[in-house]
Each structure stands twice: as C-alpha cells, then as structure tokens.
Amino acid sequence: MQYLYAAVNFLLLGVIVWLALGKSIKRMFSSRRANIEAALDEAEAVTRSLDGGIIPPEAAVNGPAEEPAKAEAAPQEPQPDEEALLNERFESEKRRRIRESEMTREELRRESMIKLRERTVKSLCQRARELFREEPYRSLIRGKEADLAEMILEKIRLTPGDMCYLMHHDVLYVTLTSAYELDPAIVERIGARASALLDEVSGRPSFWVRTDPELVGGLRLRIGDTVYDCTVDDRLYHLERDLIKRPLPHEFTAEALAEDIKQGIMDSEAIVDEFQLGRVLSVSDGICRLDGLADIMYGEVVEFECGERGMILDIEPERIGCVVFGRYEKIETLSRVRRVGRIASVPVGDELIGRVVDPLGRAIDGKDRIRARERRPIEFKAPGIPERQTVNVPMHTGVKAIDALVPIGRGQRELIIGDRQTGKSALAIDAIINQKGRNVPCIYVAIGQKDSTVAEIRARLERNGAMEYTTIVSAPASSSASMQYIAPFAGAAMSEYFMYSGRDCLIVYDDLSKHAVAYRELSLLLHRPSGREAYPGDVFYLHSRLLERAARLSPEAGGGSVTALPIIETQAGDISSYIPTNVISITDGQIFLETDLFNEGQRPAVNVGLSVSRVGSSAQTKLMKQVSGKLRMELAQYRELAAFSQFGSDLDEDTRRVLDSGERMMYALRQRRYSPMPDWKQALLIYAVSEGYADGFAPGAMEEFERKLFEFFETRCSRLRAQLETGSAMNPKFEARLKAALARFAEAVNGDAA
C-alpha cells in the first residue's frame, strides 16, 4: 500500500505538475496577471481624465488653458497660501488614489491566484485520472489490489445501525466494487470475511461484486450503509479539496503556486476513507428527505453528490429530515448523500476578527479564505451554575439613557425590543463602537436583513474603527431559512471561543424575530405540529438554549464572559405576543424603545417604565450609581405629571419646577447615533443637570450646555476630570470641589450669555 501511494504522489508531483502542467501554470498566471495590470492601468487613466479625477493644482488655480481670456480677466493673482493649500490637497488626493489603487491590485491579484489555483488543481486531478487509466500506471495499481483488500478487511465492522437492521432482517447487503474485474481469490477472501462477521450476530450477507470504471483503480466495499473506500477516484477527490483549501503562498508567482501545490501533494496522507451513504427520497423548499444513514445524529452534517451540504434536523423511524445550506435545486431525487462524520460546526478564532462571514464561517467580504485553526460546534451546552459567577462588571454602551437607567453587565443577556425603525440596531452598533480600546471582541449577527443594510453597518463600523475587533455574521433575507436558522448559533460558537479563552465578548443578535420566523418555516416544512401563532412548540427552548450560552465564567472556569444583546421586533408596540414574551422571560431585562417617544424626537426612545435591568446597579461604576440613583424615579414622576398637566393650565410652582427639571433631563439624555460617550462624561452631565446647574439653559439648548460643560472640564479642571475617570464614588470633599467647579462653570456661561 505504501508503494502504491508513493507512486501516486510521485506521478502527481513529477509527471503532472512539472511536465504536463508546469508551463501551462506559468502561462496562465502570467497572462492573467498582465490582463489585470492592463485593466487597472486603463481604469486609473480613465478615472484621472474624468471630471471627478485629480485636478492639477495649476489648473485649479489658473483655470483651463483653453480659456486665456477668462484668465486675463481675473482681477488678481491667487494668493500664495491658496496655491499651497491646493498643492497640498492635490498631493493628498494623489496619495489616496495611489493607496486605493494598490489595495485594488492586491485584492485582484489575490482573487486571481485563488481562481487560478482552483482551475489548476481541478485540471491536475482530471489529468491524473486520465493517466492512471493508461499503462504502466494501470498495471501498477492493479498489482496492489491484494494489499488494498487487506487494508479494508482490517477496518470493517458492524455499526449499531447494521445491528438494528439485522434485528428485523436476517440479510445485510455487501457490495464490492472495483474499476476492473478482480482476482477471484480476492473476491473469495472478502466474501468469507463478510460471512464470518455476520455469523457472529446470526446474519448472512447478500454479496454482490460490481465494476465501475469511474473509480479509476482500487477497491470500494460497502456493508449496509458503511463504505470503505480505497480507490484512486476517492483519493483524488480528497486531494483536490485539500489543495484548494490550503493557504495562499506569500508570493503571487507561478513558481510559488507550483511549489505550494507540490507541498500540498507531499503533505497528503494515504488512508482508507470510511463513511456512510444514503439516498435522497425527496427534495423541496430547502428540505430533503433521506433514506439510510442509520447511525447519523441530530445536528450532523451530510454532503450531497452535487457538493452542497446540509444538516440533520429531524430523525424518524423510516426517514431523516435534512435542511440544505446551499441551493437545493442542484440536488436530484435518488442521488447519493454521504455522512461527513462531524456535528455542524464553524471556524472560530482571532482569524475571523474584522471579517464578514456567512453562518458557515465562509468569507463573503471579497477577501482571502479564512484559515482558522479551531472549530466549535454550533450547538453547545451552556455553562452550569457552578461555572458561573455574579455579573458585576459594567459593559459600557456609551449611551446615556442605557448606562444610567438600564445598566448592562458583562455576562448579561439584555433584550432590546420595540417596533421597526425605532433605533434598536443603532443602540447595538453604539455598544459595539464603544468597546474600542477595551479588548472586547464583538460579533454582530444579522438575520434576515437586507444586503444593503449589512453593508451600511459594516461601513459605519469601519469609519469608527470598530471593524478591527468585530466579526459580522450575515444571513440576509435572500439566504435560505436554514442559513438564517443556524446564524445565531454560529455567532454564539464564535463568541464562546473568546469566553473560554478568558476574554470578554459582546454579541448582538439582530434580530431573533426573523430567526423565529425562519425556524417556523423549517418546522412546517418538516411537518412538525404548529402551536401558538403557528410557531412550533419548541421555539421557546430554541431561544433559551441559545441565550443561556451567554454567561460570565468563574475564575476556575477561565473568567471570560459573553454579553448578549438580542433584538426583538414588535408589532404596534405589543410586547405580549408569543415571541416577545418568550424572550423577555429568558433574558435578564429589556430595553423597550417606544414609537411615540421616537416620533417626539427623543433619541434613544427608551421607555423608562417598561425598561429594566435585573442586574441593576451592580453593573454600574460607583460614580454612576451615586449620581443616577434617583434618576429613574424622578423621570417616572415627570412622565406622570406631564400626562396630567396637559389637561389643565394652572400649575403650582413645585409642579412647574418638577416638569421643567424633568424636561431638561429628558433633553440631556438625548444622544446622536453612533456617538457613544465615556462613562465619566455621562455621570458629570447627569449630576450637573440634576443639581440644577443647567437651569439657565432652555431644554432645547441642552446640547450646547453639554458641549460647553465638557469643554470646561477638559481644559480647566484636569484634576477633577482625572478623578471622575476612575469611576469611584464621590466623598464629601470631592463633591464640594465638584460643586465649586460647576458653580464657576455656570457663572462663566451665564457671563458669556450676558
């Protein structure tokens, strides 16, 4: 056997790569690279010639050369500083265009290398199949058929599925297939071994011997559903997949490509491939009904003949239900399906940071293939109670209304709920942007969103420098229901990698309403009984086992954490419907965004009465806890008085003061999108407003008050600012100094206004 695969490797390496395809690889690579360079040069020249291109500074200053009359009519020559400014802008724009051109060239070269390697590997393997059918290679392989038979006989066994089948039938089908007619001695030996194996369980084989030229060479033995494959066709199949999945060489040259293919062939291992086969009974709407595969497990991955993959979601006595990840139109009825041998999993690790991937962990951002060193199953047991610890470390979102009223701790599950277009995703994006510099990897799972929306979110994160530590898992509305179903579980697996590595991670599920709809679609197609609002009865368990995976681990378990921010969309503010009530009962609190507040201009539109954090002040700094302790009650009192005051015009002085103070605080809690604020600034602003230092400002001028307050403390009160940044509680001495500084600020602001 060793000589056979040594000959295969030698032939593939020496004869095919260097003699048959060596020159063609260089020719294809050189030609494709020249075409790319020419196209880029032409595009760059056209861009520069357009109106939107780079305008030379002398043309921008003096005007076009074709119009000398206008130039002569100019009243005066341009000033030197204006000309220098234009020169600087020209050089800056030139450098920017050059950088973009270099990035474009690099991406196109990488894409060209990927496509060229794929074409080369497929051509190489096809050429190998042709060579192995010719002499002397065919005779060499046929001479090793007895050794191949011995290797297969060492591995054969009866699986639990075979045992179960023999309990109802006394015959088990055994099929021996080869590319050419076998020596009768080999056939007799394999038949005798199969009979002896079945005699141990009081069964007998139905032995079949077949020939299939497509196998090229070698042997394939099938016992029941299990296949033991030692053919040239199967080996080339695995070799082709392994070579295409290899990392790209550092140099984009033909020699580097050929050397990388050579090394990949040398690294390949000679094994007897063992797998189980089944067949497709029916396929429709992304759901396949399968037969066979008696030993398969729930959540396991299968591969179809067309190359698409799926996951087992339903196991019945007579058939198996499978969801297809790719295009189910390619799958034909009665075609074969093979068991991959692993539970559905995704690549995890730091390699995914900064990338946009699909729920299977495949890159969809136009960059190179992700070469992760680890994988984790998408379904994983949540940490137990002994492995958890109390949630008491803040996960700052940078949003004043959240960090002050509904604080979130690391390891918490805080629901964001509200109608569409009320700023739910904006809150989550703000929380991600605010983690910059905090060593908190973030994962944003987009479920059922538009592609343009995901692209916009990615661009926003890039502009704020947040994509450097963020992974986007995208299952857009155009993807299948199965991809939308596994998307949040894939994101949870990616976040667990950081948690079990002792790091803190933030994950956003946007949104679980669409996830529930996708699961309902799959369940109805699998003919599962529907329940309330046509959702399957286990949709509660589906979301609970997903969100329970967010936790803060104890030091003995690693000390990492996963903070989950699931998003739920309501209809007309109805939080009593099925899915909202389910997720509310699972999470540790909710942030309810009210449509009326949003329409009034309150952004974020947090409803203080219906929003709650079950962790509470444990997830706040001591400073924030001290300054915002009475804030919720004061705002609730303001909302109640405001509701009654609209029916009467005569208000006493105390009521008017409460209304003015509450309105001013509501304006102070307003915040622009994608502009998170440090915790010390939030605490300072809330303290200043609640203590009356903003009474000289109209409620609509709170943004100006905020700007001047921060500017004053950053320029004139550096020691107080440093103390505030620590987040420690204010003692009486420090509070007196802070009030004195605020009094000076109020006096200075009022003096400027006067």
Image (tube, helix red, strand yellow):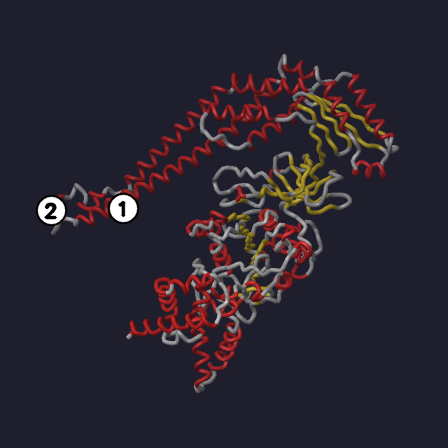
Residue 40, x across and y down, in percent: 36, 34
Q: Earlier in the sequence, mark 2 or mark 1?
A: 2
Q: Amino acid at mark 2?
A: Glu
Residue 190 or residue 502, whichever sits in front? 502
Quadrant of residue 568 in the image? bottom right
Q: Which disc number belongs to residue 89?
A: 1
Q: Secondary structure at mark 2?
A: helix
**Where is 23 relative to 419, above or below?**
above
Name the residue furthest front.
733
Name the residue furthest right.
202
Residue 166, x across and y down, in percent: 84, 36
Residue 357, x across and y down, in percent: 53, 44
Q: Is residue 443 left or right of residue 224?
A: left
Instruction: Using the numbered discs, state the Cα–Cα distance from disc 2 to disc 1 in whole angstroms.
Output: 25 Å
Residue 691 or residue 297, whichever sits in front? 691
Q: Secondary structure at mark 1?
A: helix
